[in-house]
Image: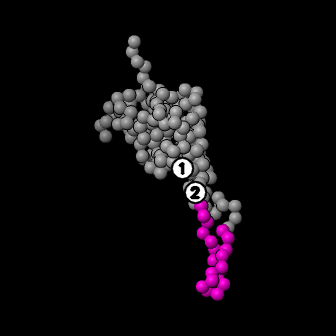
Amino acid sequence: MAKRPANTLIVVADGSRARFLRVEADKLVSAGLSDLVSPRSRLRARALASDSPGRGFSSARGGARHALEPQEDYHQLEKHRFMAIVAATLGAANANREFDELILVAPRRSLGELRELLSAAVRRRVREEVPKDLTNEPVTRLRQRLAPVLGPRLAAPERLRAR
C-alpha cells in the first residue's frame, strides 16, 4: 500500500499578517483557514498607548520637567499578541487534524516568538522554518521562493525555470 503524501500547511506570517496555504496540484492555494490581519500592529506608538507618557522632575536642573519614556514597546506588544493569535489558530487546526506537517515562513524575530507560543503538539508537526519575510509576495512568487523547501511536489513549470 502506497503511503499518501503529507498534508502540508504553509504559514507565511509577520507581526501583523498571516496567510495559510497548501500545495495542491503543483500550486499553492488557500488552506481554507482565513488569513489573519492585525491592523493595530501598523499604527503609530502614540495611537496604541492610552495616553501620553508621564512627566518627571529633574533634580539636577532645579526642578525641570521631562517626559518619561514608556516602559513597553507598544508595537512589540501588538506583534506578540498577534503571534499568540496565530499560535492559537494553529493549535485549533492541529486539534482538528487539518494538517500533518507545518512549514513556518516568517522574519527571524516573529519566527522565534511563534516558536515559543506554539504548543508542544504543534511544534512536533513543524517540518521546516524559513526565516524570511515573504508576506507581501504574490502566490506565484511564493511558489518560486518555497520550491527548494517543498521539493519535487512543487516543481516550477518550464516557463518559470527559463528565467
Disc sitting over residue 75 in the figure? 2
Looking at the picture, tell me which residue is in the foreground, 23 or 81. 81
Q: Which residues are magenta?
A: 53-72
Crowd rating for badge 1 (residues with CA inside 10 Å; few <14, some 14–19, many 20+): many
Report the magenta stretch's main SS. Answer: loop
> Is residue 58 covered in magenta?
yes
Residue 140 shows in this picture? no
Q: Quadrant of the C terminus?
A: top left
Which residue does the image show at 56% across and 55% down from the upper left?
A: 76
Disc sitting over residue 15 in the figure? 1
Where is 137 relative to 155, above or below? below
Residue type at the position of mark 1: Gly
Q: Secondary structure at mark 1?
A: loop
Residue type at the position of mark 2: His
Dividing the picture into quadrants, the one containing residue 56 is bottom right
Furthest-top residue in view? Answer: 1
Can you give x and y, in whole percent of width and height, for residue 88 in the image? 59, 39
Crowd rating for badge 2 (residues with CA inside 10 Å; few <14, some 14–19, many 20+): some
Can you give x and y, in whole percent of width and height, for residue 29 in the image? 49, 32
